[in-house]
């Protein structure tokens, strides 16, 4: 009968050991809870559990690190600057695992020593029962000693597996010999068997209650404990041995029936979960092959992958012979996605670094422009460099503000210098206008008597540096008009000198007009046309003169034509003189 009990207990242990937990769907919080609970067990049990979950925790740690890195890169960070701050749980787990491994090894050594000690103790108990038998200690004192030895046997812990069966057989044999060979008083023996009966009936009730226990794992654990207690309770009255055993076994079978029903339902759920996860694997292929050149696309796809992982966790446990295969496909797929994402952001990071080099070069060029004297050229080049800056993409996030600040300072400094130059030039121009205005006022009030005085005044005007703008052009026109008036008032100056000086003043006045150069060019074209027209006229007169050579009044005609030619030559000389002056002074 005890052999049957021993076998039943072994079956329970085997069933418990075969339970499968899908750690692949555990979150970090799940593992933290598991570790906290497991640390309350002995070190051997800790080590057995931690050894199972360690690969999954390491996988989760790597995944979380990859997610954090990808998020960091997507926000503009760089690989070299990445620091993972979520590793405290994993570092603590490694310490706990190492500690459990170390102490479980010691526990195992201690258990071997303890089992050997228990073995010797139980051998001693067997020997003492043998001594009671040999001394025929059948009285009350002998029986009390026997019961004390039985209690000591129960209190003594387990022995090594290879010695347990033989030891139990020897113990059982001497116990039977004590009862059978030494003829203990029947009433005492009957009392003991009745006491044992009460103990086994109580255990039967406890096992029968396990049939309503919803927690199958707890029910099996309790059943194992009750079987161990049943095994160590002594014999019951012979006429009730079969009945009590059948009741105990029937109650145990009911617990196992519940376990089998649970496993059947679990198998159905796992089959459904398998179909769901198989469908999710098809979706995973989309993420494996995903590629894009836009950070926003990667960000959106990462959100989808996060949601996909949540769906995978919700899909639940699958049959243990499929767990490894599915998890490999799942984790390999996620790794591929995150590796592709990392490759994209690595390339983007490289591009950002090159952008920083290019923008720094532009900034340095603008800083160099501050050394130029010609601010107009500097500003023109700076505007082109600013356009180039805008065309360059993003730089690493950690230097973005610093890079732009240096660029802005350089540009602002250049424009500040330009504004300073403009302000300085405006002050100079105002002073020049004042000095020119003083010259004009002196011309108005002065009485001129010779060309030398006029020329001296023009020299005085020219010694004041020229300015630009409408105010200066208006001032020059006033100066030129007043000089012309003063020239006309001096009769002693030859007309040709007056004309020459007036034309020079006109040319200078025209040059200061808004479209001065165009006006001078038009003036030049007009004079050249007049020059060609006069030359053509002279040629025509000369040709006509040859025609009238034999006419009766040829001499009179010749004189008339000679006068015409002389007049045209005078015009020609005047126009040539004006053209020469125009060309000379307009280029000056």
Image: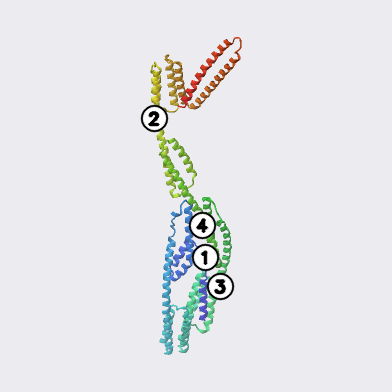
Q: Earlier in the sequence, mark 4 or mark 3?
A: 3
Label 2 environment density (alpha carbons within 10 Å; few <14, some 14–19, many ≥20): some
The answer to whether residue 437 shows anywhere in this view is: no
Q: Earlier in the sequence, mark 3 or mark 2?
A: 3
Q: Quadrant of residue 372?
A: top left
The answer to whether residue 397 shows anywhere in this view is: yes
Q: Give the x, y percent position of residue 430.
A: 40, 28
The Cα atoms of the two marked residues, 1 and 4, are separated by: 26 Å
Q: Quadrant of residue 476?
A: top left
Q: Earlier in the sequence, mark 1 or mark 2?
A: 1
Q: Tell me the SS state at disc 2.
A: helix
The Cα atoms of the two marked residues, 2 and 4, are separated by: 67 Å
Q: Which residue, given by chain and number where applicable, does mark 4 sit on? A: 339
Q: Earlier in the sequence, mark 3 or mark 1?
A: 1
Depth check, mark 1 against mark 4: the one in front is: 4
The Cα atoms of the two marked residues, 3 and 2, are separated by: 110 Å
**Residue at 43% in and 36% down:** 375
Q: Which residue, given by chain and number where applicable, does mark 1 sit on? A: 22
Q: Tell me the SS state at disc 4.
A: helix
Quarter of the image where the C terminus is located: top left
Q: Which residue, given by chain and number where applicable, does mark 2 sit on? A: 428
Residues at circles 1 and 4 in contact by the CB criterion of under 8 Å:
no
Q: Which residue, given by chain and number where applicable, does mark 3 sit on? A: 257
The Cα atoms of the two marked residues, 3 and 1, are separated by: 24 Å
């Amino acid at each position: 009968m005890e052999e049957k009990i021993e076998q039943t207990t072994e079956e329970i242990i085997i069933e418990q050991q075969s339970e499968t937990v899908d750690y692949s769907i555990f979150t970090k919080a799940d593992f933290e809870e598991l570790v906290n609970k497991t640390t309350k067990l002995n070190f051997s049990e800790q080590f057995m559990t931690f050894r199972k979950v360690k690969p999954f925790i390491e996988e989760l740690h790597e995944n979380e690190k990859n997610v954090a890195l990808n998020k960091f890169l997507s926000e503009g960070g760089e690989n070299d600057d990445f620091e993972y701050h979520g590793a405290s749980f994993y570092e603590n787990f490694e310490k706990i695992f190492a500690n459990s491994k170390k102490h479980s090894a010691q526990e195992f050594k201690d258990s071997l020593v303890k089992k050997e000690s228990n073995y010797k103790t139980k051998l001693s108990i067997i020997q003492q029962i043998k001594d009671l038998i040999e001394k025929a200690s059948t009285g009350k004192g002998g029986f009390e000693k026997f019961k004390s030895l039985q209690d000591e046997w129960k209190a003594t812990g387990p022995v090594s597996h290879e010695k347990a069966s033989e030891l139990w057989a020897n113990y059982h044999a001497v116990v039977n010999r004590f009862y059978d060979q030494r003829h203990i008083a029947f009433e005492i023996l009957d009392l003991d068997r009745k006491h044992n009966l009460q103990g086994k009936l109580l255990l039967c009730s406890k096992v029968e209650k396990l049939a309503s226990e919803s927690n199958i794992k707890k029910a099996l654990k309790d059943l194992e404990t009750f079987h161990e207690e049943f095994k160590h309770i002594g014999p019951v009255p012979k006429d009730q041995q079969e009945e009590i055993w059948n009741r105990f076994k029937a109650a145990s079978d009911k617990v196992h029936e519940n376990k089998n029903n649970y496993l059947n339902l679990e198998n159905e759920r796992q089959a459904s979960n398998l179909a769901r996860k198989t469908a999710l694997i098809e979706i995973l292929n989309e993420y494996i092959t995903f590629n894009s050149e836009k950070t926003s696309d990667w960000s959106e796809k990462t959100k989808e992958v996060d949601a996909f992982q949540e769906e995978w966790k919700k899909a639940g446990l699958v049959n243990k012979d499929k767990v490894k295969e599915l998890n490999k496909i799942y984790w390999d797929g996620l790794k591929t996605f995150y590796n592709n994402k990392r490759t994209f952001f690595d390339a983007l990071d490289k591009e950002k670094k090159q952008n920083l080099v290019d923008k720094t070069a532009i900034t340095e060029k603008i800083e160099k422009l501050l050394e130029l004297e010609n601010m107009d050229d500097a500003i023109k080049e700076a505007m082109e460099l600013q356009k180039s800056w805008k065309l360059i993409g993003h730089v690493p996030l950690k230097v973005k503000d610093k890079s732009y600040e240096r660029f802005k300072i350089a540009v602002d400094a250049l424009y500040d210098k330009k504004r300073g130059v403009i302000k300085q030039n405006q002050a100079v121009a105002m002073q020049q206008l004042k000095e020119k205005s003083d010259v004009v006022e002196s011309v108005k009030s002065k009485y001129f008597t010779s060309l030398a005085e006029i020329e001296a005044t023009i020299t005085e005007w020219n010694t004041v540096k020229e300015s630009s703008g409408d105010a200066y052009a208006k001032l020059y026109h006033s100066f030129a008009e007043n000089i012309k008036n003063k020239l006309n008032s001096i009769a002693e100056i030859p007309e040709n000198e007056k004309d020459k000086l007036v034309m020079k003043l006109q040319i200078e006045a025209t040059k200061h007009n808004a479209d001065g150069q165009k006006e001078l060019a038009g003036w030049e074209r007009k004079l050249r046309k007049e020059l060609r027209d006069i030359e053509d006229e002279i040629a025509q007169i000369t040709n006509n003169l040859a025609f009238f050579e034999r006419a009766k009044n040829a001499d009179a005609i010749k004189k008339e034509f000679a006068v015409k030619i002389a007049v045209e030559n005078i015009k020609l000389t005047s126009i040539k003189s004006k053209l020469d002056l125009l060309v000379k002074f307009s280029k000056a």
